[in-house]
Amino acid sequence: MEDAKPVVIQETEPPAGGALVKRHRISTRLWHWTNALSLLVLFMSGLMIFNAYPRLHWGDKGSIHDPAWLEIGGDKTRGYLKLGDSEIPTTGVLGHWRNAEGELRNRAFPYWTTIPSRFSLPVARNWHLAFAWVLSLVLTLYMLRSLFNGHVRKDLHIHRAEWSPRHIWHDIKDHARLRFPTGAAALNYNILQKLSYIGVIFVLLPLMIATGLSMSPGMNAGVPWLPELFGGRQSARSVHFICAFLLLGFFFIHMAMVLLAGPFNELRSIITGWYRLPTEKEVAE
């Protein structure tokens, strides 16, 4: 079936299923793709930086002589991930793997997950710092614009009725059963979407920036209290690592929802801004 042509909707007439409507502002679309690229480079370059010292500690100091709450390593025959006192074998995936030339390597993350693919801490730091500034700038601009243009108030504000346990449980069941809203209701974020977007935009991303600054020697000299907010530089590094993988988890869930809701329609909305409202028949199928 061909998509319907864009229609003009009266202010008092709610858009019906099948209509093409403008869903995302250009600022949202630009932020989305800039943010996606920045986080990809930051994540992959961050894994290379982690490879230089694949251990995480709590507190202000950490070395190979101090207990680590997480360690990824390997020897001549195996790879492992240590989480506290537990050890998980990861041979061939983490800690002990072969590069593109078939050579064995004993680094935490394999070459295809890192920037650059060959071990180089200075290059990884350059990539990481450059895109950290990009992320910080676009996040600040997006947050300010969202506050002033009403996006936070209209789209992300959680109303009192939505905090009801019954309402939250109803949304969880609808997601589990892949029951997506239709018609004009598809334009509104549900409670789970609001919580996830608020958590990413106003909690995880600012935490990533703050903990990243806490690990900078220059910032430590100018703002010595910043790492103390997280219990020390090593604690800030641990929080930075945890936030990175929470963002990765959000990405996988986000992509799963895009695929289940209709990838063509969802991609069109975030590229062009136009979104075709799903119909009851499409959801039932």
Image: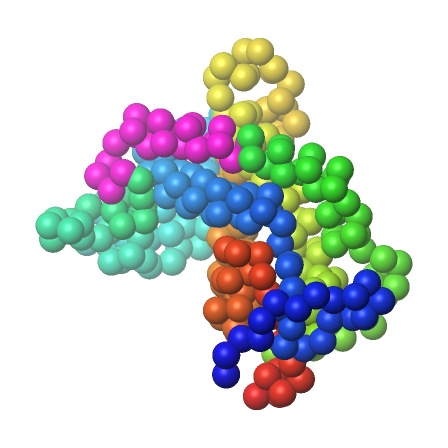
Q: Quadrant of residue 89?
A: bottom left
- Is the image coloured rainbow, by chain, by secondary structure, or in one colour? rainbow
Q: Is residue 98 left or right of residue 107?
A: left
Residue at coordinates 53% horizontally, 75% vertically from top-left? 3
Q: Is residue 229 left or right of residue 243?
A: right
Image vertical order of residue 206 relative to residue 157, above or below: above
Q: Is residue 75 magenta?
A: no
Image vertical order of residue 187 relative to residue 149, above or below: below
Residue at coordinates 60% horizontally, 15% vertically from top-left? 224
| Residue 40 in picture, x, y percent from top left | 42, 45
Q: Quadrant of the C terminus?
A: bottom right
Magenta stretch, main secondary structure, is helix
In this picture, which residue range is highlighted in magenta? Answer: 116-136
Q: Is residue 126 magenta?
A: yes
Near-viewer residue (64 or 93): 93
Near-viewer residue (190 or 211): 190
Residue at coordinates 71% horizontally, 56% vertically from top-left? 194
Image vertical order of residue 106 relative to residue 162, above or below: above
Residue at coordinates 54% horizontally, 17% vertically from top-left? 219
Q: Is residue 39 visible from the viewing direction of this image?
A: no
| Residue 66 in picture, x, y percent from top left | 44, 32
| Residue 56 in picture, x, y percent from top left | 46, 38
